[in-house]
Image (cartoon, grey):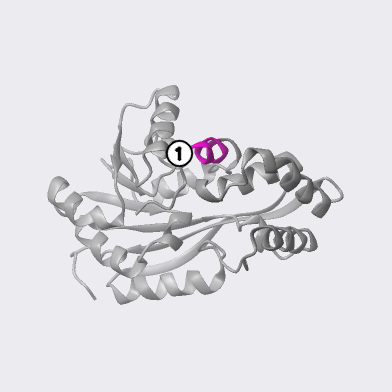
Amino acid sequence: MSAGFSGEVVEFYAKYRRGYAQDVIGWLAEAFALADHGVVLDLGCGTGQLTVPLAARAHAVIGMDPEPDMLARAKDTAAGHGCTNITWLLGSDRDLPALAGLLGEHTLAAITMANSIHLLDYQRLFGAARPLLRPGGGIAVLANGTPLWRQDSAASGALRACLEQWFEVQLVSGCGTDQQSRREYAAALKATGYVEVRETVLIDREDVLDVEHVIGNLYSAIPARQLPPPQRRPAFEERIRQALPDGVFAERVRVSVLTGRVTLAGEVT
């Protein structure tokens, strides 16, 4: 189901969302033996920030997203990188049973997903994914840093207060990156028969963003219908600048991956 991340939001997403370090791509490639004729489904692929680099390490990759604009931008990015082993599909987690019918069972080495998971029925998703995965394959749920408005810092608190006042809403979601959500995902993986369920921290560092990148990142996280209209953006952006008086935002970048595998026999244990 579309969440409204379309139109100009797509360009903000492509420009201002953090990509994935090669260390992360390498870890996934080794963990799921992607060089061994591995086919990967990147579910909720967005503009292809994970899909495209994975293509260099896998036999083939499927990028699936419910937003046509996201897929169009992802296709352009892949073409610019000379990728020829990516198939782009318009769809969501609800289409996994049909995909199993198309590909056949036990085909995929891995199914990856990131922030999109907090918009999905993850328990149903994990169950529907199992028939698609080859023995030893599995799910990888990536947390590519915490949203700027949910970090443990004075600047993040000021930014959150500014956004809550502007949009008249309480911002409580960590978009699937918070510890409680990760525990719930892990429990759901175990409950649906995955084994070796564990969270691995791959990167933990500090980064500094200027105000332009903070604003662009925020615009990338707002559904198109809720974006401040162009005539109101100068006022919105001035509010953000006032919330960050030093002109920069120091953020903690913690990249982790929650994984669960199907057993070698393909049976629930």
Q: Is residue 41 visible?
A: yes
Where does residue 12 sit, x and y in percent of width and height?
Answer: 57, 38
Residue displayed at 13% across by 51% down: 101
Residue displayed at 44% across by 74% down: 184
Where does residue 148 sit, x and y in percent of width and height?
Answer: 66, 55
Q: Pick whichever, 34 or 166, lies toward us.
A: 166
Looking at the picture, which amino acid does disc 1 mark? Thr
Q: Is residue 108 left or right of residue 142?
A: left
Q: Quadrant of residue 50?
A: top left
For disc 1, the marked residue is: 47
Q: Is residue 65 left or right of residue 99?
A: right
The residues colored magenta run 7-14
Q: How many marks?
A: 1
Residue displayed at 40% across by 24% down: 79
Compared with residue 35, is residue 269 higher up or lower down, i.e. above or below?
A: below
- Using a 10 Å C-alpha cutoff, classify the residue at mark 1 as few (fewer than 14 neighbours), some (14 to 19) or many (20 or more): many
**SS at mark 1 in the image:** loop
Q: Pick whichever, 192 or 155, lies toward us.
A: 155
Where does residue 199 sit, x and y in percent of width and height?
Answer: 48, 65
